Amino acid sequence: MRGLIVSLSSLGVLAAEDGDAERAETLFAEAERLARAHGDDAALADVLLRRGRLALAAGGLRAASRLAAMSVPLYRNYGTTAGIAWAIVLLALGEEAAGKPDRAVRLFAAADAGLRVGARVVLASAPGLPGDTVVIAAIVRRRADPSEVARQEYHVRLHLDHLQRLAEYGDR
């Protein structure tokens, strides 16, 4: 059955690329129905994400976000981080289209590096040194400085006590 679900979903992608959104939605809906009927969460996650991309292309930001969000737990259940990353990218594109660039930046950072506010990461003051576990307090957008934009880096903010411990610079 998975072959049929994947085929229908793939045909939906081709229909969307040909500009036939109505046919694409029909194919995606049938693929989703079959995936649900047969309990194929892996295929269902892919179909939901593809339907979300179609919705975003048509300007349906809420539908795109809802479909992408529905796919994340399914991808998590079968351990596909790439699917989760694509869902987060779709959510970020929706936020950007809705005029919320700061939220979009945080979501892109999460998809790109697995970072999120509240995440615990191990950081060191130099490569190869043992690090300390810190909590990401914020993820912020780069300034308009071309030298910063060209590096394609994210800026993260830490809690002060974590930064002081990491920099070996206590309360002074």
Image (cartoon, helix red, strand yellow):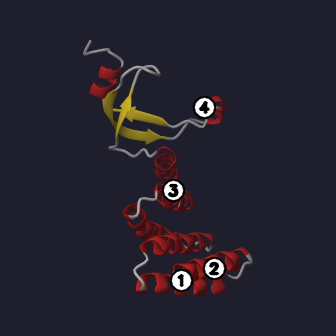
In the rendered view, would you say 95 is above or below 57?
above
Identify which residue, 29 or 153, lies in the foreground: 29
| Callout 2: SS | helix
| Pointer 1 local density, CA inside 10 Å: few below 14, some 14–19, many at least 20 | many
| Pointer 3 local density, CA inside 10 Å: few below 14, some 14–19, many at least 20 | few
- Please give the name of the residue rendered at 57% of the width and 77% of the height, measured from the top-left corner: 6
Q: Which of disc 1 and disc 2 is earlier in sequence?
A: 2
Q: Which residue is mark 1?
A: 31
Q: Which of disc 4 and disc 1 is earlier in sequence?
A: 1
Q: Is residue 8 left or right of residue 68?
A: right
Q: Which of disc 3 and disc 4 is earlier in sequence?
A: 3
Disc number placed over residue 82 in the picture, else none: 3
| Callout 3: SS | helix
- Please give the name of the residue rendered at 72% of the width and 78% of the height, measured from the top-left corner: 19
**Amino acid identity at mark 1:** Ala
* Distance between the alpha carbons at the discs numbered 1 and 3: 21 Å
**Amino acid identity at mark 2:** Gly
Q: Which of disc 2 and disc 3 is earlier in sequence?
A: 2
**Amino acid identity at mark 4:** Glu
In the rendered view, would you say 136 is above or below 59?
above
Q: Position of residue 47 (x, y in %)?
A: 52, 75
Q: Are marks 2 and 4 in contact (CB under 8 Å)?
A: no
